[in-house]
Image: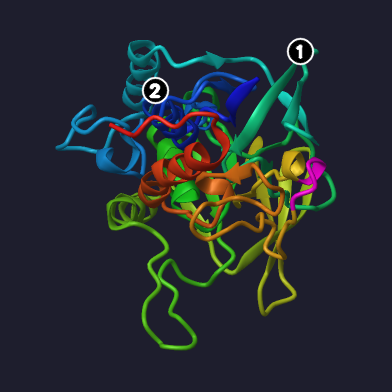
Amino acid sequence: MYDLMIIGSGPSGLAAALSAKRQGLDFLLLERDQIASTVRQYPLGKQLFSTSNEVELEPGALPTQTKPTREEVLQHYQALVDKEAINIRTAEEVRALEPCAAGFLVHTANGHTYRSRAVLVAVGGFGRPRRLKVTGENAARVSYHFAAAEPYAGQHILVVGGGNSAAQAALYLAEVEAKPTWSLRRATLDPTDPATGKPQMKIKPWVKEPLQLAVAQGLITIIKSSTVVEIRPHSACLAIQGSTEIVEVKCDHIFALIGADPDTTLLETAGAEIAADGRPVYHPETYETTVPGLYVAGHITRELHMKNALEVTPRIIEAIAARWSPTTVPSR
């Protein structure tokens, strides 16, 4: 029986594994895909939105003068796993968590069942991409994450979303001479808070400046106050807020970059309570869910800023070591 089973090898899962090793816990990390699979979905060869100190697991491991690229972060994580000899099994998806008298039975898609005193779920907050929910939406016409612009060079592409991911996707597409149109639900790039009247920054300055230049040059078309209402074989129909007008936009493909919600299926199968916001109910200090011995970390919690999530993780592991391991080794 393991002291701890960690599910998910994103930044928080890896940080938990490092902390568990330093606490002397007998642990196993299970990953359904590859190490840091969410990071692998970032655009190829492009910088992340996060700075190095927000995502690195060892100080100084990533560049300090610029934001790290997807490849630099992945290389850092893999090197750390190798150096620390982290006990990890990739391509092993956890299908169910079953509480039992001594802890948990962890059932995987590979037909394995593991026993563990405690379980930490760190599967991220993007397990369920949001859908447009319109007629004609299907996998052939719509993608929900953006990895590379090159395959769409010369094509008419519709980007839907209101954040930095959508803005950058439009920019990357313009760079390869695609013909991107961006459907923006709100009326402006810089909305104001209705309560205070103060600006609410939606698009980062380093994204907004080249975006505005590309729009001025005719490389990107933005249709504001618009919502996709129908997808056709070679186009999409947009409704314009405050008008009866329907705009038909030619598009060979659509990127719906409208966010995602955490996948709480594993927590639910174990009996954990899920709050109205779709995230688990947990103790504010230990991050233990309503099921004793079942913990959460990372973006599946309400710690949506990566740096904060990583800073919290060692504290969670300390709580687990103090309560659930047969012997506790002081942290170094």
Quarter containing the C terminus: top left
Task: Report the number of numbered marks.
Answer: 2
From the viewer's perspective, tell me whether residue 66 is left or right of residue 147: left
Q: Residue at 34% of width from left, 34% of height from top?
A: 330
Q: How far apart are marks 1 and 2 (CA)?
A: 25 Å
Question: Per the image, is 37 magenta?
Answer: no
Instruction: Give the residue furthest to the left.
Output: 65
**Picture coordinates of residue 131 (x, y %)?**
73, 49
Quarter containing the N terminus: top right
The residue segment tinted magenta is 268-272
Look at the image and tell me whether residue 42 can be seen.
no
Instruction: Give the residue furthest to the front.
Output: 327
Q: Is mark 1 on a helix, strand or loop?
A: loop
Of the residues shown, which amino acid type is indicated by label 1?
Asn
Q: Residue at 40% of width from left, 41% of height from top?
A: 314
Q: Residue at 48% of width from left, 29% of height from top?
A: 327
**Picture coordinates of residue 82 (x, y %)?**
38, 11
From the viewer's perspective, tell me whether residue 159 is left or right of residue 273: left
Residue marked by disc 1: 110
Residue 74 circle label: 2
Q: How crowded is mark 2: few (under 14 residues within 10 Å), some or many (20 or more)?
A: some
From the viewer's perspective, tell me whether residue 103 is left or right of residue 185: right
Q: In which quarter of the image is residue 129?
A: top right
Q: Residues within 10 Å of mark 1 (few under 14, many from 20)?
A: few
Instruction: Give the residue furthest to the right.
Output: 135
Q: Quadrant of residue 114?
A: top right
**Picture coordinates of residue 227 (x, y %)?**
67, 62
Position above or below: 82 against 274: above
Q: Is mark 2 on a helix, strand or loop?
A: helix
Look at the image and tell me whether residue 166 can be seen.
yes
Q: Residue at 50% of width from left, 15% of height from top?
A: 87
